[in-house]
Image: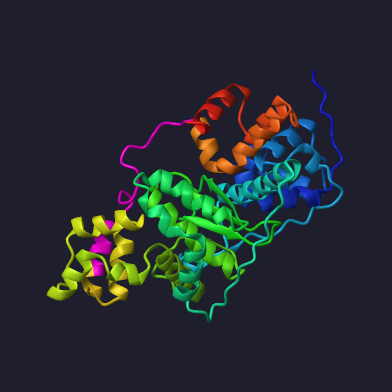
């Protein structure tokens, strides 16, 4: 008969590990197979876990056994502020998958810094700042010119454009990752409490135009030195969310340029407030945004009516609108490059090619099995 070996642990660490991933005892019991009564005994120091129980807890809490054996609960940085437009009773409460995405982003930026330092690349310090009292359009116009975003308009492939916009933001000293944000109605998040500011963008389920807007919305948060977990809803009452939406809109759709577009001039001369979808898409393609973003900018410039905007917003702002028409099956190599970014992936392969890390290290940095490494390199160089 297999002997159960009890392991001495600090019960407070077990409580911390469960609560850190937003699990109540009922959920934890279901995930681990450990009865609720037994879990209470472990968390109140009445009993000590067996090795097998510790393994199940480690798996459920996404922590190593070594972490669960710490003498005291470690101090972790708090989650970014909840900026969603959800029911007040849901504010501050997140699914474990969201918490894991935040934790992953923090781990990735540590690896990115390590790769840069190992390659002798200086970590650029984010030097820009803004105040909530500042005009977001003024800040956006200045930064857009500095980044020379207008040069990206020639990119017809929207996915290439997304990569280019990300590279521009990364050049400011920001780490950008595309992560799986499948819960909590999130489109993105930003954090300013790491060695490099972090922007996280929802990886799947949205078109590149939506991701580009999210990228600059979150950059707005970093400029304000106030990160957040965001759904980018325009129905928000939070001043900071309105500021970041206005900043992103002006970064991508500069008012002076919008008003000089031929179709806008023609509509304005006719006094026409209703826009054909074809015209909006034409403008949207030029500015690398979605048609609703264009219509919102037109509304801000009194070139459409609030009623028409609300009508179009209701018609188009549905789960199927703005999403990929043909969702792809899983492509690990593609997901890896999207998630970590081309800069990160290139640094990892460069370290391997220069023999500063071995194949196992490369696998760890990329977060993929050895068998996926050749395909990842091939796709990176495509």
Closest to the observer, 153 or 97: 153
Residue 228 visible in rendering: yes
62 part of magenta stretch: no
Closest to the observer, 44 or 236: 236
Q: Position of residue 319 (x, y in %)?
A: 33, 51
Q: Residue at x 32, y 75 (%)?
A: 300
Q: Which residues are magenta?
A: 309-331
Q: Residue at x 40, y 62 (%)?
A: 252
Q: Position of residue 50 (x, y in %)?
A: 80, 34
Residue 314 vertical placement versus 62 (above, below): below
Closest to the observer, 343 or 376: 343
Spot the residue most to the left.
Answer: 270
Q: Is 185 left or right of 11, judged from the image as shown? A: left
Q: Is 214 left or right of 259, judged from the image as shown? A: right
Spot the residue most to the bottom.
Answer: 133
Q: Determine the image quadrant of residue 314.
A: bottom left
316 part of magenta stretch: yes
Q: Residue at x 51, y 45 (%)?
A: 180
Residue 32 vertical placement versus 17 (above, below): above
Q: Residue at x 79, y 43 (%)?
A: 67
Q: Position of residue 69 (x, y in %)?
A: 83, 42
Residue 200 vertical placement versus 260 (above, below): above
Image quarter (top left, top right, bottom left or bottom right) of the N terminus: top right
Q: Is 53 left or right of 161, judged from the image as shown? A: right
Q: How is the image coloured?
A: rainbow
Q: Determine the image quadrant of residue 265.
A: bottom left
Residue 182 visible in rendering: no
Our reading of the magenta stretch's main secondary structure is loop
């Amino acid at each position: 008969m297999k002997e159960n070996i009890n392991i001495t642990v600090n019960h407070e660490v077990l409580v911390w590990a469960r609560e850190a991933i937003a699990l109540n005892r009922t959920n934890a019991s279901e995930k681990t197979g450990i009865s609720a009564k037994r879990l209470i005994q472990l968390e109140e120091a009445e009993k000590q876990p067996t090795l097998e129980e510790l393994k199940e807890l480690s798996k459920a809490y996404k922590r190593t056994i070594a972490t669960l054996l710490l003498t005291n609960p470690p101090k972790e940085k708090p989650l970014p502020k909840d900026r969603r437009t959800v029911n007040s009773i849901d504010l501050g409460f997140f699914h474990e998958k969201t918490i894991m995405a935040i934790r992953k982003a923090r781990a990735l930026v540590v690896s990115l810094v390590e790769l840069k330092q190992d390659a002798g690349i200086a970590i650029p310090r984010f030097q820009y700042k803004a105040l909530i009292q500042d005009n977001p359009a003024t800040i956006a116009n200045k930064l857009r010119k500095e980044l020379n975003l207008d040069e990206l308009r020639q990119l017809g492939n929207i996915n290439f454009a997304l990569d280019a916009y990300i590279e521009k933001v990364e050049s400011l000293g920001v780490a950008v990752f595309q992560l799986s944000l499948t819960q909590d109605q999130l489109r993105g998040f930003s954090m300013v409490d790491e060695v490099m500011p972090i922007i996280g963008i929802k990886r799947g389920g949205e078109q590149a135009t939506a991701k580009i807007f999210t990228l600059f919305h979150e950059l707005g948060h970093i400029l304000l030195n106030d990160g957040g977990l965001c759904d980018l809803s325009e129905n928000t009452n939070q001043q900071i969310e309105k500021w970041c939406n206005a900043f992103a809109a002006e970064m991508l759709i500069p008012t002076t340029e919008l008003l000089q577009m031929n179709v806008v001039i023609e509509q304005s001369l006719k006094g026409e407030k209703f826009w054909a979808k074809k015209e909006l898409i034409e403008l949207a393609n030029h500015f690398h945004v979605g048609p609703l973003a264009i219509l919102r900018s037109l509304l801000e410039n009194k070139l459409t009516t609030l009623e028409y905007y609300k009508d179009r917003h209701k018609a188009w702002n549905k789960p199927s609108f703005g999403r990929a028409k043909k969702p792809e099956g899983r492509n690990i190599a593609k997901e890896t490059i999207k998630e970590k970014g081309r800069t990160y992936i290139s640094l990892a392969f460069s370290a391997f090619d220069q023999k500063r890390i071995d194949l196992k290290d490369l696998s760890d940095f990329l977060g993929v099995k050895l068998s996926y490494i050749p395909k990842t390199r091939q796709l990176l160089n495509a």
